[in-house]
Amino acid sequence: MADTQAKAATRVIPPQFIFPFVLTTTLFALWGFANDITNPMVAAFKNIFVEINNTQSSLVQFAFYGGYATMAIPAALFIRKYSYKSGLLLGLALYSVGALMFLPAAITQNFYWFPVSLYILTFGLAFLETTANPYILSMGDPATATRRLNLAQAFNPMGSLLGMVVASKLVLRNLQAEKYFAAASEALRGQGVAKEALPEALKAYVADPANQASYAAMKTHDIAIIRDPYVILGLVVAVFFLVFLFSKIPAQGRTDHIHPLESAKRLFRNRNWVGGVVAQTFYVAAQITCWTYIIQYAGKNCGFTAERAQDWNIAAMLLFLSSRFICTFLLKYLNASRLLTVLAVAGGLLTALTILLQNVTGLVCLVGVSGCMSLMFPTIYGIALDGLDEDAKIGSAGLIFAIVGGALMPMGAGWFIDQGTLDLGCVRLTGESAAFLLPLLSFVVIAAFGWLSLRAKRAHS
């Protein structure tokens, strides 16, 4: 009997948690879908709305990941006072409302309403991630917590992959903007307009009364193509809300006796947690920048269309997905901090080659970066929360707040692209290549965190 109980205690998922684990794990795929149908929308909106530049179109990411930053702490306080189930239900409700707001946004045909809709949508995602991650960690022996979270997170890229496929085959393939403005640019070049003057000339072109009707028809068509997947997603999430509402989910205890300010003080004295927040900020920034601007990199440096470039993004996600399962298996035998350090160094080297090569081989390296990133989010999360006990709920909020990196770095990358080129003396980089200097910096920071956490664990042992 004692042996049976000991074996059950050391399982990654104890029997009593199998149903809530499976149910909660579906959410990882659900927010993965939202993340990766949205990344290509930066390029899509830039093509549709001629009046905005790359920096402005990156407001899509700023709003999407800014929603995490806004709501992470309130979400942690909410689940601390109530329960994991309450947090999941509120997250699903906000997620559904934000997605359905694409209906009125499409009616206005104003670009800035779409970031607002995404901002509300990610209020829901912040609640879901702030709740689901520590809930998964709590479902069993702390010794298997990181492996358990990696297993749950392995289903996240399945949703991400579906989001990418929908973006590529149902959205980008059917958009008319790229062909419309290609034809307009050709006409303008035939009139003697220089390549450098095309952005301003195109604005004048669509403002011409003779072209307003055709531009309006293209915009209406393309906005509807973008709108529909989000509306369907909002309805699907509403169904999930009902499923969770009527399902029994173990509460795993409440922590009303833990004061959040006291918890925060302890957390900020914990170097491991602080380092984890910093590393997570840079990781999410690198991931979102790589997956957002792979389309622009492939277009500028390889001459690919947006749809073909998105196929490379799908290949990156397939590698990410397979690597996540492989890394989850490897964690059974390798120290998490050591594996994180090795993959961060490898990711940095591949990013450097992406920047310097500026061709199809560089694009292959950029795809390879996703294989290195697969381990990082859940592993940084698990390392940072290791040993926090009841402080884990507030600590989790800090790590979800770190997703704000995905709001900031893409805007910096968009700025690099708007500059056109970057001359480093020894090499001349396109803006689309120079944008990846920022993810390169991120991998340096992540490698440093992995190495320092490994050294701290050795010292503690």
Image: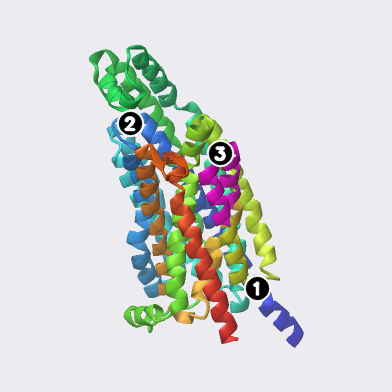
Residue 223 position, x and y percent, is 38, 31
Out of 457 and 143, give the one closest to the viewer.
457
Q: In terms of sequence position, does the residue under pointer 3 or pointer 2 come before the other?
A: 2
Q: Amino acid at mark 1?
A: Pro
Label 3 sits on residue: 165
Out of 322 and 86, give the one closest to the viewer.
322
Residue 369 is marked as none
Residue 14 is marked as 1
Label 2: how many residues lie within 10 Å, few (<14), some (14-19) or many (20+)? some
Q: Amino acid at mark 2?
A: Phe
Residue 99 position, x and y percent, is 39, 45
**In the image, is residue 142 above or below residue 147?**
below
Residue interval drawn in magenta: 347-370
Query: Callout 2: helix, strand or loop?
Result: loop
Q: In terms of sequence position, does the residue under pointer 2 or pointer 1 come before the other?
A: 1
* Res. 110 in view: yes
- What residue appears at the point 58 percent right and 71 percent down from the top-left corner? 337
Label 3: how many residues lie within 10 Å, few (<14), some (14-19) or many (20+)? many
Q: Nearer the viewer, mark 2 or mark 1?
A: 2
- What residue appears at the point 36 percent right and 23 percent down from the top-left corner? 195
Query: Callout 1: helix, strand or loop?
Result: loop
Q: Amino acid at mark 3?
A: Val
Residue 49 is marked as 2
**Dominant secondary-structure state across the stretch colored magenta:** helix
Measure how far apart labels 1 and 3 are at the Cα level. 34 Å
